[in-house]
Image (tube, grey):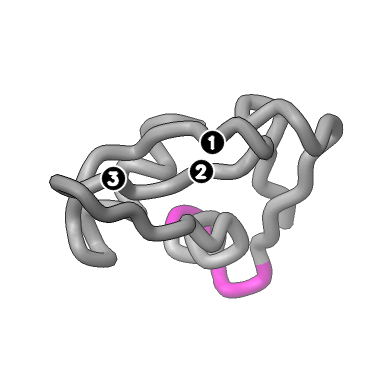
Amino acid sequence: MTDLVQRYCDRHGGGSASSRRDGGWQCARFLSTASVDLDVACREAYEPDAYARTSDAGDPYAWRCYR
């Protein structure tokens, strides 16, 4: 998941992919952060119908892409 999120960050303003305590992901750049839209990250990585789901809302590493 980290590689997928990093590619999203690279495409959408830069920064480093980092997990959040609430189970999500963010792109961190200098003193700012931007939330990652995991549905968009999955669509960009796989196909227009791909989407993201998690099996554990509190665990950022539980996210998976589905088609």
Q: Amino acid at mark 1?
A: Arg
The Cα–Cα distance between marks 1 and 3, rounded to whole angstroms, is: 11 Å
Q: Position of residue 13 (x, y in %)?
A: 20, 64
**Which element type, helix, strand or loop, lies under badge 2?**
strand
Label pair 2/1, CB-CB below 8 angstroms: yes
Q: Given the current orientation, which residue lies at the most extreme right position?
A: 55
The Cα–Cα distance between marks 2 and 3, rounded to whole angstroms, is: 10 Å
Is 46 covered by the magenta stretch?
yes
Residue identifier under label 3: 28
Mark on residue 52? none
On screen, residue 36 versus residue 17, left or right, reads right
The answer to which of 2 and 32 lies nearer the viewer is 32
**Residue placed at 62% from the left, 26% from the top?**
61
Q: Position of residue 52 (x, y in %)?
A: 69, 53
Q: Residues within 10 Å of mark 2 (few under 14, many from 20)?
A: many
Residue identifier under label 2: 25
Magenta-drawn segment? 45-49
Is 10 covered by the magenta stretch?
no
Q: Where, by quadrant of the figure, is residue 59 drawn?
A: top right
Please identify the quadrant where the C terminus is shown: bottom right
Label pair 2/3, CB-CB below 8 angstroms: no
Q: Position of residue 16 (x, y in %)?
A: 25, 39
Q: Please tell me whether residue 54 is drawn above or below residue 34 in the rendered image.
A: above
Q: Position of residue 8 (x, y in %)?
A: 35, 54
**Residue placed at 27% from the left, 66% from the top?**
12
**Which element type, helix, strand or loop, lies under badge 3?**
strand
**Residue placed at 18% from the left, 55% from the top?**
14
Q: Where, by quadrant of the figure, is residue 28 drawn?
A: top left
Residue identifier under label 1: 20
Mark toward the viewer: 2 or 1: 1
